[in-house]
Structures are given as structure tokens and as C-alpha cells.
């Protein structure tokens, strides 16, 4: 069975490498390659991808195939690309990746499966996007959902809401996976009061409020691993910065070291899908505090939950993890046990079966 992988239009291995997520993609596609003949249709120029091609092929057993960059070119390549025509299924990794999949379905009748996790409308509102922008996203989502063989949604509540909004679509709840062997518990250094965030440094992650909350705690230090427009404000070398440690993105294979070197993990987001970084922190047995917009964590059972826009509540819950070592140890152990339901060895076979059922 031949499966074509479609990243977001204009992205590919190079963009994944910049964010440190390329190794995770290798693991994901490596599982696919055990069941399918996989072709990865990169949206980046060949010159940008050639440095990754050899390792990509060795790690995943997949073929790399370039797609013309840009939205217009990506929409038309299925009409003339003979490799694309031979696919039995396209696997779009996002709504933007589904655009060429739509064209391939209309032209060749090739079915596609798409992932959907983020609440794009909420993110657009946070960034002050226009009503026209919101209507465009809504139009694209309706078009993709109506045409997809299946839509894999990573949050149960979002899946239920989307099924109500799109009753004719096949919405399948399918959470993100975590590698429990790679991300495993280890004892944190004694006297540790470091607070960790991993992810994009963008407005919807609520990081400036987090920085203020941590700065109000004695001896606490915030470390933000990732990249984005807030990096300068969080950790820049200027008097107005929040003095957080911002080392930039780390390779996915190096993240276990980050989780094992801190006292707790915090995810203060104003909106979330099914956050991979949180699952990884839980798998490392790290006590976690999250906003009430995140989900996953059950308050005082598998972690602590605070109100997303209440800086004082955020500070109080983080302080509990830093000051009460017995509570932190209990919550970390409970988090590790709870996250086992997202084991890659459980969820990837389910995903592969879904793709096999949807292929032409």
C-alpha cells in the first residue's frame, strides 16, 4: 500500500529540523514504513532538503519527493505529478497540508486522512485577525472535513464539538503518542527550583504571564525551550526582558535531558490541542501545572490546574510544586502512570489500521 505524507504547504524536513522535531517525524514515519510504502512530499526546495535526505531514508525507509513551493503551485502539482498519481492514500498532517490532498482527490479520486488538533479560530482571535481571516479558515475546514476519508482529532472534547458542527464528516478521536522508553523518569538534582516550558514562544502560550508568576517566587528560574517572537521579551539581554533562560529549540532526542534537569513543567496556554510536550514531561515523571484551557491533567490527581488568566493562581500552584516535595513526587508518579495510555506502541497500530481502512 502506497501512502503519501503531506506536511503543511511550504514546509518539510528543513522546517522540522529548525524546530527540533525532525527526529520525532523519523520515529513516526518509521512506524508507517513497517506497514506501507511511504513517500514524503516535501514543500521545500530540493536544495534545502538534500542534507536530510540520506538520514531520512535510513531512519524511515521512506522516499523523499519535492513539491513546488507556494500555495498556488502546491494546489496544481497533483495534476501533473506521476508519483502523486500512484498513491493509494494521502496522509495530511494539518489543514494546510490537506489543500493539495483535496486536489488529488478531485483529480484522481485518491482518499486522504487529515490531522486536526489546534483551535485555529481561537488562535486567530488572540492574534487579532480579521473576520475575513476567520471566515477563510472556516471555509477551508468545512471543505476539508467534507472531503476527507477521516479527520483525526487529538482532543476528545474538540472531536465531539467538531462532529456536532460537521455531522457528515468522519471525525475520529486519536490522541498524540509519547515514546515511554525515550521519555522515562530520573531523579532531579537536589535543591532544584527551575521551572520548564517547552514549545513555541508565541502569544497564545501565555508566556509573559508565566514569566511574571515565576519571577515572583523566591529562587525560581524559568527556562523556555523553543523559538518564536516572544524570545526577545522573555530572555533578551536588555533591562525590559523577564530574564528567563531561552536557549532556543532543542532537538527532540535531547528533550529528556531538559525534563530531567528541572523541578516542574508548566504549560500556561490560552488554547491547546493535545500537547506533546506535556505528555513527554508526564512520561519523565515530572510534576506538571497547566492552565484550565489545556486538559489532560486532573487537578491534584495527576498534576495541578490554574486559571489561565489568573497570574496569582498560577504563581500559587507553581509554588506548591516547588515547595511541597512530597506532593510533587506523588503527582509526578501519578502523571507517569496516567500517560501510559498514550504509549506509541498502543496508538501507532491504531493509526495504521485507520489508514489501511481508508485507502482506495
Image: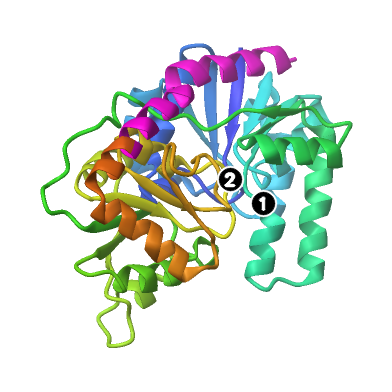
Question: Where is residue 242 drawn, in percent x and y?
Answer: 32, 77
Residue position marked by numbered label 1 in the rendering: 119
Region in magenta:
331-360
Question: Where is residue 173 drawn, in percent x and y?
Answer: 66, 29
Query: What residue do we see at 28% from left, 69% from top?
Result: 217
Left or right of 16? Residue 111 is right
Main structural element of the magenta stretch: helix, strand or loop?
helix
Quarter holding the N terminus is top right
In the displayed structure, 35 sits above or below 106; it is: above
Left or right of 131? Residue 98 is left
Q: Which of pointers 1 and 2 lies earlier in the amino acid sequence?
A: 1
Assess whether mark 2 and mark 1 are in contact (beta carbons under 8 angstroms): yes
Give the residue furthest to the bottom. 239
Snapshot quadrant of residue 252: top left
Q: Nearer the viewer, residue 44 or 159?
A: 159
Secondary structure at badge 1 equals loop
Snapshot quadrant of residue 5: top right
Q: Nearer the viewer, residue 19 or 107?
A: 19
Q: Nearer the viewer, residue 187 or 26?
A: 187
Amino acid at each position: 500500500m502506497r501512502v503519501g505524507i503531506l506536511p503543511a504547504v511550504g514546509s518539510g524536513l528543513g522546517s522540522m529540523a529548525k524546530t527540533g522535531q525532525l527526529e520525532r517525524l523519523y520515529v513516526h514515519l518509521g512506524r508507517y514504513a513497517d506497514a506501507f510504502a511511504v513517500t514524503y512530499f516535501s514543500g521545500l526546495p530540493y536544495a534545502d532538503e538534500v542534507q536530510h535526505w540520506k538520514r531520512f531514508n535510513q531512519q524511515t525507509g521512506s522516499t523523499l519527493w519535492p513539491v513546488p513551493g507556494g500555495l498556488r503551485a502546491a494546489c496544481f502539482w497533483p495534476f501533473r505529478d506521476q508519483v502523486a498519481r500512484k498513491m493509494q492514500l494521502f496522509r495530511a498532517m494539518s489543514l494546510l497540508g490537506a489543500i493539495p490532498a483535496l486536489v488529488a482527490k478531485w483529480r484522481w479520486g485518491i482518499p486522504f486522512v487529515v490531522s486536526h488538533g489546534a483551535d485555529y479560530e481561537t488562535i486567530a482571535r488572540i492574534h487579532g485577525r480579521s473576520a475575513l481571516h476567520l471566515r477563510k479558515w472556516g471555509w477551508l475546514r468545512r471543505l476539508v472535513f467534507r472531503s476527507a476519508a477521516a479527520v483525526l482529532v487529538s482532543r476528545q472534547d474538540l472531536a465531539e464539538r467538531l462532529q456536532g458542527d460537521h455531522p457528515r464528516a468522519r471525525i475520529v478521536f486519536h490522541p498524540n503518542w509519547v515514546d515511554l522508553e525515550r521519555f522515562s523518569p530520573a531523579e532531579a538534582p537536589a535543591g532544584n527550583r527551575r521551572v520548564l516550558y517547552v514549545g513555541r514562544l508565541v502569544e497564545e502560550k501565555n508566556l509573559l504571564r508565566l514569566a511574571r508568576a515565576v519571577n515572583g517566587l523566591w529562587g525560581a528560574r524559568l527556562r523556555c525551550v523553543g523559538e518564536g517572537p516572544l524570545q526577545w521579551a522573555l530572555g533578551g539581554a536588555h533591562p525590559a526582558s523577564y530574564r528567563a533562560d531561552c536557549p532556543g529549540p532543542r532537538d527532540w532526542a535531547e528533550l529528556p535531558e531538559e525534563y530531567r534537569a528541572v523541578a516542574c513543567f508548566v504549560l500556561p496556554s490560552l488554547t491547546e490541542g493535545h500537547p506533546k510536550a506535556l505528555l513527554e514531561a508526564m512520561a519523565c515523571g515530572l510534576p506538571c501545572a497547566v492552565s484550565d484551557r489545556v486538559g489532560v491533567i486532573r487537578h491534584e490527581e495527576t498534576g495541578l490546574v490554574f486559571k489561565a488568566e489568573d497570574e496569582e493562581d498560577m504563581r500559587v500552584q507553581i509554588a506548591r510544586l516547588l515547595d511541597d516535595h512530597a506532593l510533587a513526587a506523588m503527582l509526578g508518579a501519578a502523571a507517569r502512570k496516567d500517560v501510559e495510555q498514550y504509549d506509541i506502541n498502543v496508538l501507532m497500530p491504531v493509526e495504521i489500521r485507520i489508514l489501511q481502512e481508508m485507502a482506495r
